[in-house]
Image (tube, grey):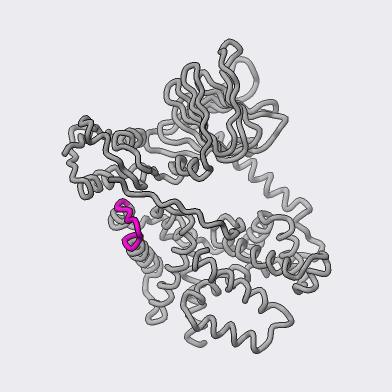
Amino acid sequence: MSVATDIEERAADFLMRRGEPAWSGEDQRELDAWLDASMAHKAAFWRLEHGWAAMDRLAALPPQWKSRQPVFPLLRQRWKIAALAASLLLAIMAGGIYRSFNSSAVQAKFATLVGANLTVPLPDGSEAQLNTASAIRAEVSGRHRWIWLDRGEVYFSVAPDPSKPFVIHAGARRITVLGTRFAVRRDGQKVTVSVVDGRVRLDGDGPASGVGSVTVEKGGIAVADGGTTLLAAQSVESIERRLTWRQGMLNFDQSTLGEVAAEFNRYNRRQLVVSDPTIAAMRIGGSFQTTNVDAFIRLLRDAYGLRGEESGEQTILSR
Amino acid sequence: MSAENSLNAWFCREVLPLEPGLMRFIRRHWRDTAEVPDLRQEIYERVLTGASREIPGHVPHYVFMIAKNHMINRARRARIIQFDVVADLEAVVVDADVLTPERQLSAREELQKVQAGLHRLPPRCREVIELRKIEGLSTREVAERLRIGINTVEQQTTHGMRALSDFMLGGTGRIRRPAPKSRLTRGQGS
C-alpha cells in the first residue's frame, strides 16, 4: 500500500475516534504528537477534517430523513431534462435533427472533428464519448435504443435496461448490450470491440450476413473484419490502457514507431510519415497527449536522434 | 490564533478549493493513476512546508509550480524514466482552467452536494454515516442499533469519511480499498 494511503487511513482513524465519548487527554496528546511529526500528517488530517466538517450539514436534516427513501427525485428529474436538453442542443450543433422514415423516433447526429473529443448524454441515462474524427447517429426512444457508428471510435457507458437492449450498428456488424461499459472502433469494415465491464454480443448486421454470433466478456477484445471475428481475452487493465484517449492520452507499450505514427495521425491534421522501414520498426513506449505531436517529435530527436522535416501538412521522420 | 491554526485555516480556505483542478492537472500529466493520491499528498506536504515559512502571494500559481516541479523530480527519480512525461511537464504552461478555484457553494448547495455524496456510498456505509451525522450516535450506539460489530462500524466510518471528503473536493466519491499491488513496469523501448 502507498505511504499516502497509510497516512490518510491513520488520519481518518484519529478523526473518527476524536468524535467519540471515549476520547481522552492521552488520545489528544497522541494525535498532537502525530501531527507534529510531519507536514504530510497535517496535510492529510486537515484535508479530511475539512471534508468531514461539511458532513455536519446533515445534522440540519430531520432524524427521520433517510437517503433510502428517494432522495430529492426532483433534482434527478431536472438532471435528466438537462441531459436531454444538452443532447438535443449538441445534436443541433452537430448537424440537425430529422425524423427517420420508418418510425416517429427522433434521430440525432453527433460528430467530432480531428483531435476533438465529445461526451454525449443520451436520454436514457447512457453516455457516449466520441473519440477523434468520429460520427454516430442515435435513436433512443421509449421503445428502443439504437446507435449507428458511421466512423471512428466511441466509448459507451450504458444504463442497464433489460427491456430495451442497446444496439449498435457498425458497418456489417451489430453489437447488443444490456448494460455495460465498452468501446467500439470502426476502421472501414473492421470493427473492434473492447469491453471494460459487463458483456456484449457481436453479430452480423441483418439476417443475410451469415456471420455467427460472438459474446465478448469483461476484459475481452473482439476484432471483426469481413467474415471473420477474432476474440482475445485480456486484462481489464490492458483494455483501459487502450482507452486512455478518453483522458486525451495515448499509451504505448513496445509498439513500433510505424504503429505509433499511425495512431497520432488519427488525432492530428499534421501527419507523420515514416518511409524508412528500419525506423518504422523501432520500438517505442511511453504516454503522450494525443494532440501534442511536437512533444513526440522532440522526444524522437532527443532520445533516438531522429529528424523531423516539415513539408506542408506532413512531417517526414528520418535519421 | 496560533501559527498552526492560521496555517490550517489558510490551507482550507486557499488550497483545498484548488483540488479539483490540481487533480485534473496531475492526471493529465501522470501515467500511473494508482500513484495520483500519493502525488497529491506529497504536493500538499510541500505546499504546507513552504507556506509555514512564508504565506505566498498568488496561491494558485504557487501550488501549481510546486506540483509541476515535484512531478518532474519524481519522474526523473523513477526507475524507468519516462522521457515524454518529463518533456511534457517541462514544456507545460499551467492552463487557466486548472487555476480556477472551485466556486464557494451556498449552504443549501453544500447540503445538496453532501446528500449526493452520501447517495454514492454503498448502503451499509451510508447507513452508518447517517446514524452518526444525522442522529449523532457514537460508534457503540451505531453498532447496537444495526447489530453489527464495533470494528465494522469503525471501518465503515473511515471509508465513508474518506470517500465523502474526496467527493466534496471534486473527486468521484468512491471508496478506495487497499488494492493488491500489481503494477506493471513498462520500458521506454530501445
The quadrant of the picture occupied by the C terminus of chain B is: top left
Tell me if I can see residue A89 in this picture.
no
Q: Residue at x 19, y 40 (%)?
A: A308
Tell me if I can see residue A20 in this picture.
yes
Up/down of A125 relative to A104, above or below: below
Q: Position of residue A113 (x, y in %)?
A: 39, 33
Q: Residue at x 47, y 59 (%)?
A: B36
Q: Is residue B76 magenta?
A: yes
Q: Nearer the viewer, residue A28 or A123?
A: A28
Query: Residue A159 is drawn in which quadrant?
Result: top right
Q: Position of residue A254 (x, y in %)?
A: 35, 42
Q: Is residue A104 left or right of residue B180?
A: right
Q: Position of residue A35 (x, y in %)?
A: 53, 81
Magenta residues, start to end:
B75-84
Q: Residue at x 67, y 56 (%)?
A: B121
Query: Residue A249 is drawn in which quadrant?
Result: top left
Q: Is residue A97 magenta?
A: no
Q: Residue at x 68, y 66 (%)?
A: B155
Up/down of A253 relative to A177, above or below: below
Q: Residue furthest top?
A: A208
Up/down of A129 relative to A68, above or below: above
Q: Position of residue A2 (x, y in %)?
A: 50, 64
Q: Is residue A236 left or right of residue A65?
A: left
Q: Nearer the viewer, residue B121 or B136?
A: B121
Query: Number of numbered discs present?
Result: 0
